[in-house]
Structure formats: structure tokens, C-alpha cells
Amino acid sequence: MTHDLLDRLAPLRRGFDSPLQRRLSHAKRAYTTRRVPPADLSRLCCGDDVQPRTGDLVLARVERIGKHAQLEQVDGRRATLFVGDEVLVAYGARYAPDQFEAMVPPTLGPCHLVAGGGVAAAVTARHAAVAPATELLPVGVFADAGGQRVNMLQHRLLPLPVVGPRPITIASVGTSMNAGKTTSAAYLIRGLSRAGLRVGAAKVTGTGSGNDPGLLRDAGAVAVFDFTDAGYASTSNLGLDELDDVFERLMSNLRAQHLGAIVIEVADGLLQRETADLLVSAPFRRGVDGLMFSSGDAMGACAGVQWLRERQLPVMALSGTLSRSPLARREAQAALQLPVLGLDELSDPQVAHRMIETIGSGHAPELAA
């Protein structure tokens, strides 16, 4: 570290002679850290020998405001950030072609806030139209009273035993971020709920934020989980075993909710390694009955559906932002012989019934009273 950086860190790591719990009470705490009990945050690990790990909780000072000028807190409120604020966030990588590519840094040196839900990482590339990332100066990573590093994995959901038949399960996938996957999933949940089904939802990959789970709840899902519940601030750079564990852990918790249907979202696009690996994995194939594919245009839909069909994945329908264009809809339908469902259709209970019938899986969905 440079002498200038050491000088800046010295008073921060002393805590200005403030007890850690009092200091934490003034810090802005991110959504990604919500499952960790405050009582476990007993001490800070500092120094050049501390190597951050995915899921470690870190106390950091805001040095410069950039792309993310707000932090989504544990209660969902977006708190405005100011230079000098201390924030409690989690380390994780980021894969976002429309924003940042970022990695967990090797040291406690300066890094960035790469997602408003509270992900700390070192930016390696950014989209030309996006402002530079908000800059953070880590103070230290947290340890418990026994000196053990505090990590999100220690507080993840436990897998539950699987009992009874699996609810009908539909996955929302797409070409890329911002293709309309989450919105399509939400409106499908709305349609299934209006059809009388108890619906659960999960976002199994992505970057930590409460926005998407909140939307799925608002649409009518009675139980919603995401990958942060499985111990990760982000699923970027996870191996297949870790991705499978996230999927199976969330699905087992949903199946315990006595649901008639489950809607899941797989983030980003088919060319992202983690997405591609999960979609062809054995747990995913066993656990999903049909896929809804979102795209911004007909050509993207054609390429994506071809990719899925080559891997024998059951594509049921198209959706996403292409559904806003009558011409793009006609192009996609003519090329792929698949229905294109806009938001009105997805939220229609009759369409939802037809989708369930199309699956023809032999499951018997439970109807809400």
C-alpha cells in the first residue's frame, strides 16, 4: 500500500475510538447482508494479509459517488450515499454487459460498489455509456466473537427434505440482462395466481438486489427466494456444483410451501458461462417443466431458441421486450412457430391455464381456496 492510503486507513481502522457496535449502528447496511445477525459482527479483520472472499462482509467508507448513488438497505429502502458514509456490504463478482464486469479483489485495497444491493468488487471493465463506479475504501472484513470470518454462506437457507410431487415449474430465461425476463416472470406469476394457483418464485442467479424479489411478491407469489438466501451476493464466477446447490436449496425451500406452481428466473443471457452451465445441468433438467424465452428482437429469439432446442430444453413461449413490437412478434412467430406472450397475455388466467395444460406433466396443481 502507498503511504497516502495507509494514512487514510489508519483512523478508519481505529474506528475513531468508537465501539464497533455503535459504529455499525450508523453504517448503511446493504440488502445482501440481511441474513447475517448483527450480533455476529463482533470484530474487524484488517491488514495487508487479509484476502477477501466471495460472501465476506466488509465495512467500507464511500470515497467517491459514481454510478450507484444509493444503497438498497436491509428493509428495502434506498439510502442516498454521501462521501464519508460507512457502508456494510458483501464481496462478490459482477457480470453485467450493460454495466460492469468486476472481480473480488485480492486485498483490502480500494474497490467499488458494483451493485446497488450492496456488492463490493474491483471493476475490470464497464459499458461506455455507464458512469464510473462508486469508489469504496474497505476498513476491514467482519469476524465473530471467536475470530472466525463472517461469510454469507454461514447463514444461508438449509436444504429441506423433498416431500410429495413437484409443483409445475417454469423458468424465465433470455438473451441478456434487460431482455425482460423478470417482468415476464412477474406477469406470469400474476396470471397463474389469478388462475387460482399458489405460486412460489425464485431468482436463482444474478447480482444481489431486493428489487426483483419484491416485484415477484407484488405479482402474487406467496413465497420468494433468491441466491442471496443461498449464501451469495452474486452468482458470477460460481462453479457448477455451487450453482446446482443454489438451485436445489431454493427449490427445496419452495416445495415446502405447498405450491401449485413455481416460476424461476435465470439471470443474464445464454452466453454467460454460469447461465449456460446451469441450464444444461441435471438438477435443472429434472426440476423444470418448461422455459419462457425473453429477447429484445426476433433474431435474438431465433438464436436463443435454437441454442435451447439443440440442448433439448423445452421452450414453451417467447416474451420480453420484443413483445412490444407487432412486427417483431410476427417475425419471431413465423420463424419459430412459438407463441409470443406480452404482459397482458401472461397475466391472463386463461393463458396461464393453457400453459399448464401444454406442459402436460401429469402434476395436479393445488388450487387456492
Image (cartoon, grey):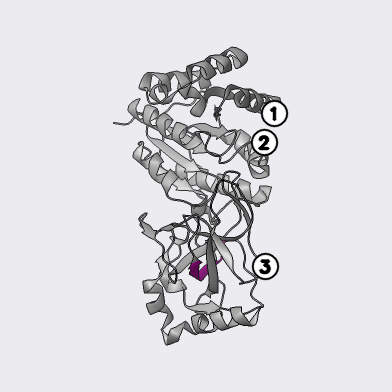
For the C terminus, the image quarter is top left
Label 1 – label 2 distance at C-alpha: 7 Å
Residue located at (37% from left, 31% from top)? 190
Q: Helix, strand, or loop for circle 3?
A: loop
Extreme-bottom residue of the structure: 17
Left or right relative to 306: residue 343: left
Q: Amino acid at mark 1?
A: Arg
Q: Nearer the viewer, residue 149 or 60?
A: 60
Q: Nearer the viewer, residue 271 or 61?
A: 61
Residue 117 horizontal/vertical position (percent) = 46, 55
User: For mark 1, what is the residue?
Assistant: 311
Q: State which region is magenta.
A: 55-63
Q: Position of residue 87 (x, y in %)?
A: 45, 67
Q: Amino acid at mark 2?
A: Val
Q: Secondary structure at mark 2?
A: loop
Tag 2 residue: 280
- Camera-side residue: 214 or 164? 214
Name the residue tied to disc 3.
106
